[in-house]
Image (spheres, rainbow, N blue to C red):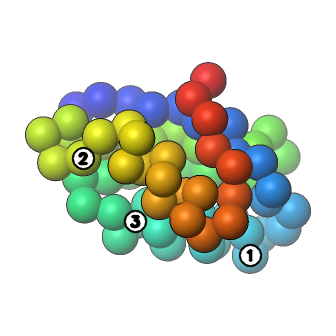
Amino acid sequence: MAQLVLDIGGMTCCGCVKNVQKVLDNHIGVSKADIDLASGVATIDFDEQQTQEKSIIEAIEDIGFDACKR
């Protein structure tokens, strides 16, 4: 298992957090995702054999948020 910590830009409310959480929960290979609205940080545990960091970042960006590795 690997861990990815991302700064997520554009989250302004709990609804935003729920949208990002849903995308991550449904992303193949992601086993756990913790998202903090106040800091704008997402901590994601994933299986490197099933997905890559780039794919996770693109999934978040596809729903309209900025995501960059810390």
Q: How far is the residue under mark 1 from the one under mark 2?
A: 25 Å
Res 25 label: 3
Which amino acid type is shown beneath numbered disc 1?
Gly
| Residue at image mark 2 | 51
Residue shown at the point (77%, 48%) measured from the top left: 9
Residue 58 in the image: above or below residue 67: below
Mark 2 surroundings within 10 Å by alpha-carbon count, few (fewer than 14), some (14 through 19), many (20 or more) = some
Q: Mark 1, residues whose alpha carbon is within 10 Å: few (<14), some, or many (≥20)?
A: few
Q: Secondary structure at mark 3?
A: helix
Q: Secondary structure at mark 2?
A: loop
Q: Circle 3: is it few (<14), some (14-19), or many (20+) Cα within 10 Å?
A: some
Task: Give the mark, 1 or 2, whose residue is nearer the N terminus.
Answer: 1
What's the amino acid at mark 2? Thr
In the structure shown, which secondary structural element does the residue marked by tag 1 occupy?
helix
Residue 11 visible within the image: yes
| Quadrant of the rendering where the N terminus is positioned | top left
Q: Alpha-carbon distance for marks 2 and 3?
A: 13 Å
Instruction: Tell me if residue 21 can be seen.
Output: no
13 with respect to 45 (left or right): right
Depth order, front residue of 5/56:
56
For marks 2 and 3 on the same chain, the one whose residue lies earlier in the sequence: 3
Find residue 35 and report its horizontal and vertical position in percent. 62, 50
Who's the residue at 62% across and 35% down the image? 68
Q: Residue at x 81, y 56 (%)?
A: 10
Q: Residue at x 24, y 47 (%)?
A: 51
Q: Amino acid at mark 3?
A: Asp
- Residue where numbered disc 1 is placed: 15
Q: Is residue 12 above or below residue 68?
A: below
Residue 49 placement (x, y as % from top left)? 12, 40
Distance from label 1 to label 3 (Cα)? 15 Å
Residue 31 falls left or right of residue 5: left
